[in-house]
Amino acid sequence: MLAADNPYYGRAVPVDPPRGPARVVEAGKTYEWTEDALEVFGYWLAVGIDAAFLLSISGAYLLAEAALKPVGADYSAVQKMGDISNRLPVANPKDELGRLVITISALLSRLEAAFVRREGALERQQR
């Protein structure tokens, strides 16, 4: 039986020769190489986890930036619009943002038509 503070471990391997009684080979070896290997493995595991964490954060940031880029472009275009007759450019009419821009453009068209009708009604009233 091995003591807890003993740095060696023992191994007994039975050897059964073709004739004669069975024999047992015993060997002892220290745990140092196992401890060293586990220490190196633990270090590289920590480095790998840290690297994966940083990579996932940077990837999420890049994906969010790419997803929100069209929104920023449309926001800039809306800020530059000075006249109701201007329309926003539609980059991709099949996605959610493209359908939203098309809906806003249709709303602006109806508002423009309502203002034209209003101006015509005001002119008729003044005459």
Image (tube, helix red, strand yellow):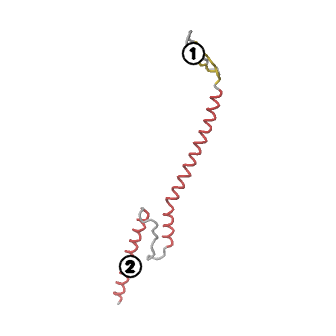
Query: Do the CB atoms of the residues marked 2 and 1 lie less than 8 Å apart?
Result: no
Type of amino acid under label 1: Val
Decide if residue 125 is on the left or right side of residue 36: left
Type of amino acid under label 2: Phe
Where is residue 45, by image quadrant?
Answer: top right
The residue sitting at 38% across, 83% down in the picture is: 119
Secondary structure beneath label 2: helix
Q: Position of residue 111 (x, y in %)?
A: 38, 75
Marking on residue 43: none
Marking on residue 115: 2
- Near mark 1 (Cα within 10 A), the count class, few <14, some 14-19 or many ≥20, is few
Q: Quadrant of the N terminus?
A: top right
The residue sitting at 58% across, 12% down in the picture is: 23
Q: Quadrant of the C terminus?
A: bottom left
Secondary structure beneath label 1: strand
The residue sitting at 51% across, 64% down in the picture is: 72
The residue sitting at 38% across, 79% down in the picture is: 115
Give the Cα separation between the discs numbered 2 and 1: 102 Å
Q: Position of residue 28 (x, y in %)?
A: 64, 19
As drawn, which residue projects farthest toward the front?
A: 18
- Camera-near label (2 vs 1) is 1
As drawn, which residue projects farthest toward the bottom?
A: 127
Q: Which residue is mark 1?
A: 15
Decide if residue 67 is on the left or right side of residue 11: left
Identify whether 33 is placed above or below 84: above
2 or 123, nearer to the observer: 2
- Near mark 2 (Cα within 10 A), the count class, few <14, some 14-19 or many ≥20, is few
Decide if residue 89 is on the left or right side of residue 26: left
- Circle nearer the N terminus (2, 1): 1
